[in-house]
Image (cartoon, helix red, strand yellow):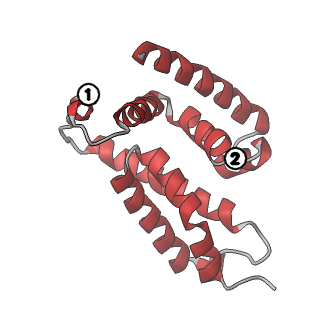
Amino acid sequence: MNPPFEQQVLDLLPRLRRFATGLAGNAADGDDLCQMCVERALANRRKWQEGTRLDSWMYRIMRNLWIDEARARSRRSQTFVGEDAGLSVGSDGAQEAAVELGNVDRAMQRLPEDQREAVLLVMVEGYAYKEAAEIVGCPVGTLNSRLVRGRDALLALLEEAA
């Protein structure tokens, strides 16, 4: 017997948060995105069919929310701090790792959205190509192409930053 819907959603939270943070580019926006996703899933739980993959359904919800948010953000004129502004802020220990992680994050944000999604789903979340393709709604070959291009671009951007 499957656990209740709410428990299944709770079990997915760490993975959803990691994906949301990857899409959003920072933990605060990722948390907001994750919260919107859970809220929408709970409000529309009758649309989810028992026996189907809840994780895929919720990833699709999150992806659609992110696309909507990206469109809204592009319409708003906001001023952003330069990407290097936070590199001079230090803490006790692990600064090099934090800087390197920041470099990876900035490189990820420079990837086109479709490539970033493919890299996040396959390389970070560990989805099989077929599952990731279903989540983003494209053929497996298209996802594979996006992943290869995204991985190559990510490596090139990281070499640039080094």
- The residue shown at (46%, 73%) is 39
* Residue 61 can be seen in this image: no
* Residue 76 can be seen in this image: yes
Direction from residue 86 to residue 49 in the image, left or right: right
* Quadrant for the N terminus in the image: bottom right
Q: Depth check: give the residue in front, 162 or 96.
A: 96
Quarter occupied by residue 74: top left
Residue wearing tag 2: 126
Residue wearing tag 1: 84
Q: Amino acid at mark 2?
A: Gly
**Residue 27 location (% of width, % of height):** 38, 52
**Residue 84 location (% of width, % of height):** 26, 27
- The residue shown at (38%, 38%) is 94
Quarter occupied by residue 12: bottom right
- The residue shown at (43%, 52%) is 68
Image: 113 above or below 84: below
Q: Secondary structure at mark 1?
A: loop
Structural distance between the alpha carbons of marks 1 and 2: 30 Å
**Residue 45 location (% of width, % of height):** 60, 79
Query: Which residue extends farthest front?
Result: 93
Image: 46 above or below 20: below
**Residue 53 location (% of width, % of height):** 74, 66
Q: Amino acid at mark 1?
A: Asp
- The residue shown at (67%, 74%) is 48
Q: Secondary structure at mark 2?
A: loop
Q: Depth check: give the residue in front, 23 or 94.
A: 94
Image: 144 above or below 27: above
Quarter occupied by residue 41: bottom right
Q: Depth check: give the residue in front, 133 or 98.
A: 98
